[in-house]
Every structure is written in C-alpha cells, then in structure tokens.
Amino acid sequence: MAAEQRRELLGLFEEPDQAADAFTRLREAGFGDTDLEVISSTPYPEGAFGEAHIKHRLFTFPFAGAICGLVIGTAWVVGAQISEPLVTGGKPIVAVPAIIQILYEGTLLAAVIFTVIGILFESRLPDGVGLYDKRISDGYIGVSVLATDPKMLAARQSLEQAGAVDIIAKDGSIMSSPQESTAS
Amino acid sequence: MIKPEEAALQIKQRPAFKPASIRPNLRHAAIAALAILAAAGIVAYIIKLGSWGEAGRAKWAYPTVALMYILSTAAGAPLVAYASRAARGYWALPARRVAELYIIPATISYILLIPILATLPPLEGRSNLWFNFHAGAPFLTDALAAAIMVLAGVGMLWISTVPDLAVAWRANGELSSWQRALVFNWTGTTRQWIAARIGTKVFGAFYLMAYIYTHLVLSTDLGQALVPGWRSGIFPAYHALTGIQGGLALTIVTLFLLKRYSSVGRFIGNEQAINLGKLLLATTLLWFYFFWSDFVLVWYARIPSEVAAMQLTIAITYRLPFILGFLGLFLIPFVCLIFNPVRRNLWSLAAVGGVTLVGLVFDRIRLFVPAMSHPDPFHHSLGTNLPDAFGPSALDIVFLIGWIAIMALAFIWAASRLPVLGGWELRHGAMLRREQQFMKGHVYVLGKPD
C-alpha cells in the first residue's frame, strides 16, 4: 500500500506561549516529533515549546574532516620527503617534528571545510521547510504541521484553538480572515 | 550592579528588533580623509609592485609592518566574539558582530601577504621553521595558514550573519536568487538555530587555532628567521598575545566610535567597557610576562649571537621604536587601567585602546623592519657590527598609513553592508535578561539555557 501523502499547515502565533500550547494540542491529537516544527526569528531555548530534543551530529563533521586532512597532509609531506630525500641535521628523512606543522595545517583546513558542510547538512539547508510567512520575520512564531488528509482537520483545529492568528496552506491562508502571506 | 544599556534591555521580540547597517557618508571629513589615504596606500602598493626586484626584500620591510599590524589588530578582533560566545558572556552581545566584521579587512591583507612571501630567501643555509621542507615552505605553507584563518573567520561571520540577513530580506517578501544563494533558504527552524549556535562556536574555535598558528609561522618566517642569531621560542607566543591585545583595543575603539557617531551606539555602554577593560588589562600584564620571559633568558645566558639580535631589536638599533612600543603596549595602559574609573568608562578605555594601537605600530616596526631589511640571513650570528637602522622612505610612510586606512575603510564598508549588531543574539539575550526587585533592592537576572 502506498504511503499517504502529507501536506503542510503553518500556524502563526503572536505569543510564544500560544505556540507552546499549539504544540501540546497537536501532540494530544496524535502528531509526532517528525510532524511538527517551530519556525522563529529568534532562537528560543531548546524545548521551550515542548518540542523534542534534537540530536545533531555537527561535531562529527570536523572530526571526519580532520582525519581526511591528516591523511592528505601526511601523504603530502611523506611523499615530498621520500621523493627527494635530504638528510637535514642528521635527522631521519621522515621525522615527525619536521612535518607536524604541515599536518596541523592539513588537518585544520579539512576540519574547517567539513564544518561548513556539516552546518549545511545539520540545518537541512538549502531545503528549509516548505511554508514561510513574512510575519515570522516580524516576531510571530510559526508552528508547522505535516498531516495526512484524514488528520488535516485535527491539525487545523489544534492550531485555531491555541490562538493562531492565521493558518497557511500551500495555496495561501485558510483562515476566515486571511492576512498577507507568502509560500516559499 | 552592572547592567546593560536600557536600549538593550528593551529590545522587542515582536515586532522583531532588526539592527541596521551603518550609513557612511563620503562627504564626512573623516571618511573622505580615510578614502584619500586608502587611495594613496593602493598607489604606494602598485608602485612597490612596479619596482619589483629593486632593493630586494628591504623594500617590503614597512609593508610587512602594515601586514603584521593588520594581522595583529583586525585579525585579533574576531577572537573577542568567539571568547564571549565560548564563555557565554552576554555582556558582549553588542560587541560580537562588530568584532567579527574585522575579518573582512583581515582578508584584504592577503593582498599584502603574497608579494611579501615572494621576497623571502630560500630556506637552505639559514634558520627556519620548516626543516628545509622543499615542497612548498615557506610560501605555500604560510599562505595556506593565513587562508585557513580567513576561511574559519569568514565561516564564523557567515553563520552569524545569515539569520539576520534572512529575517531582514524575508520581511520584504520572496528572496531573490542571489539572496537565496547567500542565506541558503534559512527560515529559522529549531534545527537551524542549533546549527547556528554551535557553528559560530566551532568556527570560532578553529579561528583561534588558525590565528595562533598563523602568527607562529608568519612572525617566525618574516621576523626572527631572517635575523641571524635571533632564536626564541617565546617570540611567536608574544606576537600572538600582542595581536589579541591589539584586537581588543581595536574593538574598544570601534565600539566607542559607534557609540559616538552611529545610531547603534545606544546599545553600547559601560557594561562592555567594564568587561573589555579587564581583558585589556590582562593582556597588558601578559605583554610584560611574555616580553620579560623572552628578554631575561637572553640577558642571563649571554650567548653572543642572541645578545646581538636583542641589541638590534631592543637595546640599540631600534631602541626608539621599542621604547614607544613599551610605552604604548605596557606602561601607559597599565598605569591607566589599574584604576577602576578608567576601565569602567568607554571613553577613557577607548583612549587607552588608542594608545595601545599606536604602540603596536612601533612594536611591529622594531620586530619586522630589522628582519626584512637585513640583507644576509645566511649566518649564525649578526657578529659584532650591528646593522644600521632602516628608516622609512616617504613612500613607506604613505604605504603604512594608507593600509591602516584601507583596514578602517574595509570595516566601514562591511558595516555598511551587513547588520553591525547581531540582531538574533541581541533578541535572544534580551529574552533572557531581566532586572527585578530583590527584597528592597534590585538585581539583574540572567538566564543561560545552554
């Protein structure tokens, strides 16, 4: 059986408490962590809306990059020393103290590059979310819900009962008194 | 009770406070003067490049001073942003973006770095950091070190600025294609905020690592490796530390100027002065620690080659720049900053910061002019006859002043294109700070959720 297609609703709230209330109501209506998302112009303390703790893996990216950079850096310096062996100061051709700086550079460079990739990946950028309203830029809190058709009504009712000033679907506002909105 | 400026406490979440960029006016005398000096600096740079090969490395002695000065001030400033984030110092909220924006002038200094590195003599037969590594040192390795520092700094500025730009641009409707490319469709989900908060710290940590390393290799390759007999393990640390001192001083002076001449000044006040003043005092004391550790070892050991190098940069040949550097980097700041009223007032603290910045110019002159102007680094010692001081030509003076003006203009340009205050961090900070009554008095309550 094919999975039911989910559609997105975006509820807009003036107050953070209302958005938190919407989260509670949506959970009671059977929506899970992966169905709900808060969108705001300010970072609220994690868990302020009752959202689930998000496990991020950003720290693994610099480590992975560092290992790649270390390997490439090692290949560079060891390859250079072996290809043109020059005994300097009676030291071994490949001596760790002599190559440590190059290894540091290679490790750091790759770690920084992988951090950029990690931030994009962990932020789910450039995908973002489907719906956005420019009132969020003015301080409104957006609560995004992914719902299947049978649960659309429950989602809408939860948002309305929590005090949403507007509810937006892909085609625009679905509130009785719609305000200006943009879907991106 | 130390508390933020009233304006910072009254920042609203709705409508969301959105900081603007500054609006420089070319008709303003100071901006016009900076533009003229910057143009002169560019002309001097072109003249220096045009006469490539004449007078060799010595011709780039004062440009090296300009380069190392920018790397010691503009490149040091972003560390203020990182340090305050790492230590969760909410007092620095209005100062973080200001400090970060200095990565733009630090990036521009790369234009100076390339020709200067190209003048360096071969490694074989002279002191060097690279054990005669022939596959890229010192040109490629030094350029790469600076590039990593710049990359980490730009990364920190980017992830810190994206939320502000996205909010500002989205408030005007749909993002254009180039705006979308720059902010990667940022919307402000919980996951994105976590990435932004952690990303600024991770990039900051890498910036610190790259900054220290860049100072290590550049201060050695452009400094002590070119003066026979100058061998110091403390000198690179001294150089990095004075760079942090310069970055702090530059941040303080910039905050003062913003408070005095821009609309964002209402968020900046004595809360920042009190904390930055302590840090500046700490680095001033560390200046003496590092300098004295370096000096007394050579003085007591009395190895002739090391004594000669010390006589060159400190005691005899470049004594005047050393004294001016000593006054500017230690004595005057120390005497002033031990008094609380000086540290607690942004105006007086900025004056001390200005003295520090001037002292740093002379310190960099005494460190890099003798090195870059010394014709023969292929010896173990300077011998008994110390080289003469290498004075600046008119072109050198124009170059030095012109590139300091370029640094200032680059910052002004960046601050006119990007929000000069971190809007999302200020809003976040305002959300978590309250002044409330405690018994019969008032206390300042600060929440630190992460």
Image (cartoon, coloured by chain):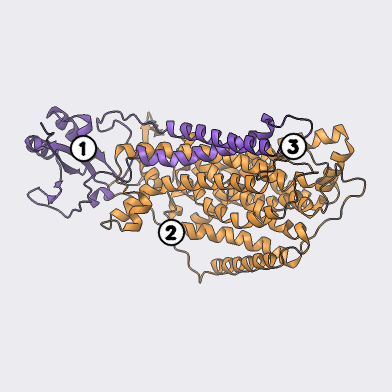
Chain colours: A purple, B orange
Q: Which quadrant of the rendered structure holds the C terminus of chain B?
A: top left
State the separation of the CA atoms marked 1 and 2. Answer: 34 Å
Toward the bottom, the furthest residue is B27
Quadrant in the picture for residue A20: top left
Q: Position of residue B12 (x, y in %)?
A: 31, 47
- B417 relative to B446, above or below: below
- B246 relative to B43, above or below: above
Residue placed under numbered mark 1 in the picture: A19
Residue placed under numbered mark 2 in the picture: B417
What's the chain of the residue with tag 3? A
State the separation of the CA atoms marked 2 and 3. Answer: 51 Å
Toward the front, the furthest residue is A83
Q: Residues within 10 Å of mark 3 (few under 14, many from 20)?
A: some
Marks 2 & 3, CB-CB < 8 Å contact: no
Amino acid on which disc 3 is placed: Leu
What's the chain of the residue with tag 1? A
